Amino acid sequence: MDDGRQMERQPEGGPVDNLIQPFMIDQTSIRGRQVRLGKAIDEILGAHDYPEPVAALLGETVALAAILADALKFDGIFTLQTKGEGPVRLMVADVTTDGALRGYAQVDTEAVAALGDVGGHPVQRLLGPGYLAFTVDQGPDTERYQGIVELVGGTLVECVHHYFQQSQQFDAAVTVAVRRHADGWRAGGLMLQRVPDEGGVMAARAGVTYEHRDMAEPDDTWVRALTLMATASPDELADPGIAPNDLLFRLFHEDGVRVYEPQPLAARCRCSADRVAGFLATMPDTELEEYMIDGEVEITCEFCTRSYRYDEAALTALKGK
């Protein structure tokens, strides 16, 4: 779809990792995006000591957030969040318009260990009953847009497809994979989206727009594209030895595939000493005392695990006393 980028072919020798690669299938209304994450996802997952199935599920959440955010027209922060009654009570991944990624999970590690093998149904086993939320925040002067759907499906991809079906704002399909290699975690994914020939858009709340067409019975071209996408194995999606363009060529070369300028992605938390100081400066003294341990208040970012410590003198200075 037309997302405002210059429609230029990606030069040979361009970036092959930590990116969103837009593409289109020639002579069709089908647009796509490929996400490839190496160092970025390894930094996000490596900041925590999650059980491996939880890390893999969070990796999928981050990859899905990146690829879904790139399908929207907005300026701000896109958040993909799950909340359930299982051992993984909460998962959050967000991405800014300029490609800054982060994510974390709230986990009962003992309960996860007691599960054993979660098999091919991590949503039921790890998340349990709950919901999936899509949120776009474009700043304090705009209305926040949010879509919420029940967690229906054995995998996050199935839950996202359920959202597509319920929202009727996307005629789309996604697939993602997360793998742990010797040099760290990797993730990859594909999204196909069918766009109307007339190029129309449906305006949603908060100024967020989606490429849209009626959810009619898919035609042969759409079914063929989905079938070809399904031949991409999880190992291929996350393989550091397969360049993004090579995978796209393997999948769609018979129909013709055109790539556009990729958007870089990076693990970058938005926490800072200034933001923490501003938060503490407005906190009532009685609440600050509850956080005080051995004469210090320590605030740890849930995303990147960076800690910020303030002794009584520093807190007094923040309060302007």
Image (cartoon, rainbow, N blue to C red):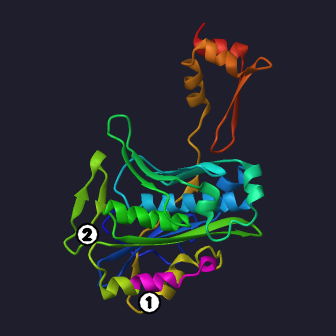
The residue depicted at 77 percent of the width and 57 percent of the height is 114
Q: Position of residue 221 (x, y in %)?
A: 33, 86
Q: Position of residue 240 (x, y in %)?
A: 65, 74
Could you classify mark 1 by the number of other residues whose Cα lies within 10 Å: few (under 14), some (14-19), or many (20 or more)?
A: some
The quarter holding residue 137 reads top left
Q: Which residues are magenta?
A: 225-236
Mark 1 residue type = His
- Camera-nearest residue between 153 and 247: 153
- Would you say residue 59 is visible in this rendering? no
Q: Which residue is mark 1?
A: 253
Q: In the displayed structure, does residue 136 sit left or right of residue 208? A: right
Q: Earlier in the sequence, mark 1 or mark 2?
A: 2
Q: Position of residue 236 (x, y in %)?
A: 60, 80
Mark 2 residue type = Arg
Q: What secondary structure is marked by label 2?
A: loop
Q: What secondary structure is marked by label 1?
A: loop
- Would you say residue 80 is visible in this rendering? yes
Looking at the picture, does residue 281 appear above or below residue 114?
A: above
Q: In the displayed structure, does residue 132 sit left or right of residue 146? A: right
Question: Was residue 42 drawn as part of the magenta stretch in this picture?
Answer: no
Rounded to the nearest angstrom, the CA distance separating label 1 from label 2 is 25 Å
Residue 213, disc: 2
Could you classify mark 2 by the number of other residues whose Cα lies within 10 Å: few (under 14), some (14-19), or many (20 or more)?
A: many
